[in-house]
């Protein structure tokens, strides 16, 4: 999501880390809502009643865990997800939550941390959790406010005790951090920071601005984390306006990264993670407005880019919007160069009140197949088979009718596959757990992941 949103007052501002404000660690998951009879992909959904769940025959909603205090205010939108062992970590504009998912059918809240800031894109590495802050605030701490534009960047937490995460340090980055990507290399952890800019006369985002910044986080001494590089990457058109990427996905074992850099896609050589080299820049002005994210297939022979037409707040899954806009584009990687193939967009028309566009998703570890699960805001969650790059197709879906509460912006922000289930971070309604049972996807259930950060891909 890229549109600006003014944050309200900090929740539990007097307390940096709140187990006291958190829901009970033993809070049970809510029972799944009643589902309508399943339908096949391609069925129009414009008449789906508010809140009503609909799925394809092969997908079911296992359970839902609603947002809870202190992260359930009007401005506390659920955002991104990360996983480690039996835990799921869910970002939120108000902070982040940790859930015990050892039983995926009944996740339990372990702790919640009130640390307000826009985005709070989340990753985990060992005992460290990192949050992206894309909002100038009065200071680096969780007790900061949005009343002074003095600091933005990364916040780092110690999560060795999941019941009581501890704030460790922060790193200020130019124009903040909209998203970030971990690139482990030997015994070091590098973090690629993505942010748009510059903003003239800004304290935190002055010109000039680089495509990305690189933070080194010493795992044994995270307090000494610092920006170690802001490489000069020769992007055509950078002189015409905003510079920066929305999202970068790294594939360290392949020495590759793919960046969705707002107006363009880029392919990078990251053999030296502190000195990435531009391999290719691609554009698609006829179809793509905001290059939002990138996903490699399992052997890094393809990249699926998504377009967040309208910035996440517009109803672009309607009959008025072409199927190539606000969609996915599949590129084959041939002799080191990206070649455009087909497009994919969910085939169900959404109502004019439903913000809907391609958003965050992840690959399913299915040998010999290219299958992805993806969030579409109020368009729900879609499973797409892009094995045939020219003819990607939906093989399953989950969605609800329009959100009828306050705020208007709703739906699935991120939907990721992890150890047999899909976890969907719903902006307004909390954590959804989904399951797909299908001959195409069942082989993924044989793969055991120890951790998962979607922007740092591995071969499975």
Image (spheres, rainbow, N blue to C red):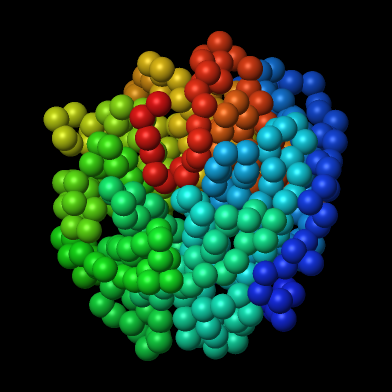
Residue 333 percent coordinates (x, y): 23, 31
Say if 254 sits above or below 247 in the image.
above
**Residue 207, visible in the rendered structure:** yes
- The foreground one among 158 and 205 is 158
Residue 280 appears left or right of 252:
left
At 72% from the left and 81% from the top, the residue drawn is 14
Looking at the picture, does residue 145 appear above or below residue 185?
A: below
* Residue 179 in which image quadrant: bottom left
Number of on-image labels: 0
Relative to residue 55, is residue 196 depicted above or below?
below
Residue extending farthest to the front is 220
Q: Which residue lies at the image location 46% right of the left edge and 73% below the top edge?
A: 170
Camera-side residue: 448 or 57?
Answer: 448
Q: Position of residue 303 (x, y in %)?
A: 33, 35
Residue in the image at 55% along x and 33% along y: 417
> As drawn, is 304 to the left or to the right of 38?
left
Residue 59 position by quadrant? top right
Image location (x, y in percent) of residue 231: 20, 64
Q: Where residue 326 sits: x, y (%)?
A: 47, 45
Residue drawn at the location 69% of the way across and 47% of the way down = 99
* Image quadrant in which the C terminus is located: top left
Q: Is residue 324 visible?
A: no
């Amino acid at each position: 999501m890229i549109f600006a949103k003014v944050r309200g007052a900090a929740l539990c501002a007097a307390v940096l880390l709140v187990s006291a404000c958190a829901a009970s660690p033993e809070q049970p998951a809510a029972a799944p809502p009643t589902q309508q009879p399943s339908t096949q992909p391609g069925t129009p959904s414009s008449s789906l009643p508010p809140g009503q769940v609909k799925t394809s025959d092969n997908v079911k909603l296992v359970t839902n865990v609603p947002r809870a205090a202190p992260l359930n205010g009007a401005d506390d939108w659920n955002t991104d997800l990360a996983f480690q062992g039996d835990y799921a970590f869910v970002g939120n504009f108000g902070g982040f939550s940790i859930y015990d998912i050892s039983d995926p059918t009944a996740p339990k809240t372990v702790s919640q941390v009130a640390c307000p800031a826009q985005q709070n894109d989340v990753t985990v590495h060992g005992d460290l959790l990192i949050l992206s802050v894309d909002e100038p605030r009065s200071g680096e701490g969780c007790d900061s406010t949005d009343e002074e534009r003095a600091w933005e960047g990364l916040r780092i937490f110690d999560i060795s005790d999941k019941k009581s995460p501890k704030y460790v340090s922060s790193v200020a980055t130019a124009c903040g951090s909209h998203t970030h990507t971990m690139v482990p290399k030997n015994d070091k952890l590098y973090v690629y920071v993505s942010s748009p800019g510059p903003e003239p006369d800004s304290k935190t985002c002055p010109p000039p601005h680089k495509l990305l910044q690189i933070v080194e986080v010493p795992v044994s001494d995270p307090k000494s984390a610092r920006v170690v590089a802001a490489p000069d990457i020769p992007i055509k058109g950078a002189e015409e306006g905003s510079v920066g990427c929305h999202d970068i996905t790294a594939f360290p074992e392949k020495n590759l990264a793919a960046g969705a850099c707002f107006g363009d896609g880029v392919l990078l050589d990251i053999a030296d993670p502190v000195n990435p080299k531009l391999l290719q820049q691609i554009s698609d002005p006829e179809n793509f407005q905001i290059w939002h994210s990138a996903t490699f297939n399992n052997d890094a022979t393809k990249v699926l880019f998504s377009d967040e037409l309208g910035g996440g707040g517009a109803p672009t899954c309607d009959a008025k919007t072409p199927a190539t806009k606000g969609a996915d584009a599949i590129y084959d990687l041939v002799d080191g160069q990206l070649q455009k193939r087909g497009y994919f967009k969910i085939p169900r028309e959404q109502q004019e009140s439903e913000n809907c566009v391609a958003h965050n998703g992840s690959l399913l570890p299915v040998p010999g197949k290219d299958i992805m699960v993806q969030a579409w805001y109020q368009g729900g969650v879609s499973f797409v088979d892009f094995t045939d790059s020219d003819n990607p197709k939906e093989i399953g879906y989950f969605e609800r009718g329009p959100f009828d509460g306050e705020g208007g912006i709703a739906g699935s922000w991120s939907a990721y596959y992890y150890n047999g289930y899909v976890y969907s971070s719903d902006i307004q309604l909390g954590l959804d757990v989904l399951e797909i049972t299908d001959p195409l996807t069942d082989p993924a259930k044989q793969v055991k992941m120890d951790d998962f950060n979607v922007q740092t891909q591995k071969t499975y």
